[in-house]
Image (cartoon, rainbow, N blue to C red):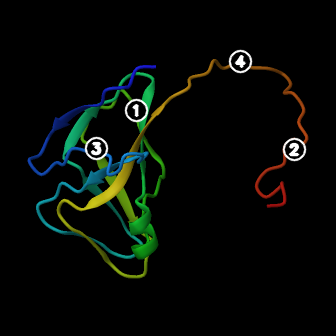
Amino acid sequence: MAQPILKFKRLSELAVIPVYQTEHAAGMDLHAATATTVEIPAGEITLVPCGFAMSIPPGWEAQVRPRSGLAVKHGISLPNTPGTIDADYRGEVCVPLINLGHDAFTVEPGMRIAQMVISPVARVVIEEVDDLDDTTRGAGGFGSTGR
């Protein structure tokens, strides 16, 4: 499979092109494209712009995930993690950050706020049936495996 090409369109002069920080990094850092600081009070959600739009190749998606350092040190996460950006979306990439910590958190201009992983998407054909094949687990839901 050929390496996918992610087309990047700068919408703001503050936008930072996503890049892999290390040779084997799975995700690219997303940066806040804000001219001033943005405060996220404890327990609140704030949508932070990244200042760019992109074109993801068909058959691929972008998954937006929290940065582990912000999560561990400050309780900063995403309310819908991972967030999916579909291949046909052309609007500005923004990151909804949630402050799960006890104190307000300040997003600085240009700060790395999330990471983005580009992944292939499998599409299936839906077939309606009267019965499903049996398994050992059956209909056992949350916690049913004893873990």
Real-space Cα separation, disc 1 to disc 3, in angstroms: 11 Å
Query: What residue is disc 3 on?
Result: 93
Task: Check disc 1 and give the amino acid type.
Answer: Asp
> Looking at the rendering, in which quadrant would you find the C terminus?
bottom right
Task: Check disc 3 and give the amino acid type.
Answer: Val
Left or right, 41 with reference to 78: left
Task: Check disc 4 and give the amino acid type.
Answer: Glu
Real-space Cα separation, disc 4 to disc 2, in angstroms: 22 Å
Q: Earlier in the sequence, mark 4 or mark 3?
A: 3
Q: Quadrant of residue 133?
A: top right
Whether residue 83 is visible, yes or no, is: yes
Real-space Cα separation, disc 1 to disc 2, in angstroms: 33 Å
Q: Secondary structure at mark 1?
A: loop
Q: Callout 3: few (<14), some (14-19), or many (20+) C-alpha neighbours within 10 Å?
A: some
Query: What residue is disc 2 on?
Result: 137
Real-space Cα separation, disc 4 to disc 3, in angstroms: 34 Å
The mark found on residue 127 in the picture is 4
Q: Position of residue 21 (x, y in %)?
A: 32, 51
Q: Earlier in the sequence, mark 4 or mark 2?
A: 4
Q: Position of residue 16 (x, y in %)?
A: 19, 48
Residue that lies at the very extreme toward the front in this rendered image: 23
